[in-house]
Image: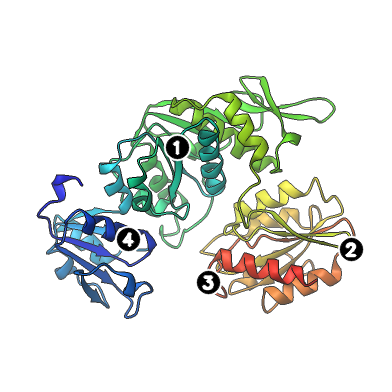
Amino acid sequence: MNSALNGKKIAVVGLGVSNLSCLRYLIRHDLRKITLFDTRQQPPRLSELPAGIEVRLGKLSSAVLSEYDLLVLGPGISVYCDEIQAAAKAGVEIVGDIELFAREVESPVIGITGSNGKSTVTALTTLMAQEAGLKAVAAANFGVPVFDVLDQHADLYVLELSSFELETTASLKLASASILNVSEDHLDRYHGSIEEYAQAKQRIFAHADTAVINRADPRTVPVKKIESVSFGTDALSYGRVVENGGEVFLSVKGERILNVRDMKICGVHNELNALASMALCDLADVGIGREAQIRALKNFRGLPHRCQLAAEVSGVSFYNDSKATNVASAQAAIEGLCGRHKNGILLLAGGLGKGQDFSPLKRYLGHEVEHIYCFGKDADKLLKLDPERCTYAKDMATALSLARGAAKPGQAVLLSPACASFDQFKGFEDRGEQFTAMCALL
């Protein structure tokens, strides 16, 4: 453990999975002047706390927090919170578990952020490294806390990083890093400003050796000068070669690498994910050769709740894309599936909109999307897109039933909600699992 923390009075704010893991790590390394703060009176996992931790529950106090030397914020606690801002002004250092990990890790690290696709790119990049014989582990926003894997002494760590995690990260050194894309998401946290959201993601490049840029999205370009390559749908750099007959190949500087038909994941968005993964591996320069990358691309089946085929009934395909918690992700799913389902898509959408603008979905109505069945807290905002082609449903089960009754052979029923799930579900996983279970009974 970094000796700079010895003797410091530390407050851990928020009892989430990542901070629980961080607490265990701190205790194992004899840092015992630690207090846990949580605004909830009965936070989950309270019984899992290591012995000897002081616990303070309820409303945060600026004066109390300002007495500490270091605050470790969980990603669910905004740095813009008044009490946190007051502590920072009083000279308290504000970090997250990723920042503490950055001070401890000795192996190379690849970092990935973006509004959409980051979990897929994290998983695929990790698989490429493993195919090359490296002991590689994926962690952070990917679902595995960094302090659960630090002691594994991996050859390579691949971190999926949310904007929330990056807010409190200042010294993370990365062999290669990428902002895959930036679209409206979490604007409720960033004062309605996509630029403020993008600035949080730009922190990934602060100490990165190299960068992977999305050619179609200027917000993914590092503000600082850094060695970089780009990916996109054309044949430049990491790209795609489209032949006259319609065959599509992943390519690097125009050289064909792999026919996309040989991949188990489909859609242009997944082709871009594959290209970003290849570029991250190449720039990291840790020995992940092209043959290992190709093996991974051929073997990778995708992640749960991301355009997964849940059922086929009477010629109708049902897809679980519950991970689509923003509009851009739903757009990617529609564009990825429309080539397979030229008879049209019936979209199930709704939940917590997080202040997003749903109007980009309107252009698909009457074209790729025949109808939208709208459910959840912000269903009314989706209904305004087109009163004739949008129908209200009280919940997801009702939306599925309505879509099932209207669907014709060759069409797809796509759960791609474009919203967060916490109004009616425990999380996107719960939403996707319930949808899949319902589809199994059709």
| Residue type, numbered disc 2 | Ser
In the foreground, 152 or 253: 152
Let me know if residue 350 appears in the view: no
Q: Going from the N terminus, do you reach mark 4 or mark 3 first?
A: 4
| Residue located beneath label 1 in the image | 135
Residue type marked 1 = Lys
Cβ atoms at labels 4 and 2 below 8 Å apart:
no
Q: Dot 2: within a 10 Å radius of its alpha carbon, few (fewer than 14), some, or many (20 or more) residues?
A: few
What residue is pinned by disc 3? Answer: 426
Q: Circle 3 — which element?
A: loop
Q: Which mark is residue 314?
A: 2
Residue 13 can be seen in this image: yes
Q: CA distance from mark 4 to mark 3?
A: 19 Å
Q: What is the C-alpha distance between the residues marked 1 and 3?
A: 33 Å
Where does the image place residue 105, in percent across and percent down from the top left? 30, 40
| Between marks 1 and 2 in the image, the one whose residue lies nearer the viewer | 1
Amino acid carrying mark 4 in the image? Asn
Q: In the displayed structure, does residue 291 sit left or right of residue 383?
A: left
Q: Place residue 103 in its image quadrant.
A: top left
Query: To which residue does mark 4 refer?
Result: 19
Q: Is 208 positioned to the left or the right of 322 in the image?
A: left
Q: Are marks 4 and 3 in contact (CB under 8 Å)?
A: no
| Pointer 1 or 3: first along the chain | 1
Q: Image quadrant for the C terminus?
A: bottom right
Q: Is residue 163 left or right of residue 275?
A: left
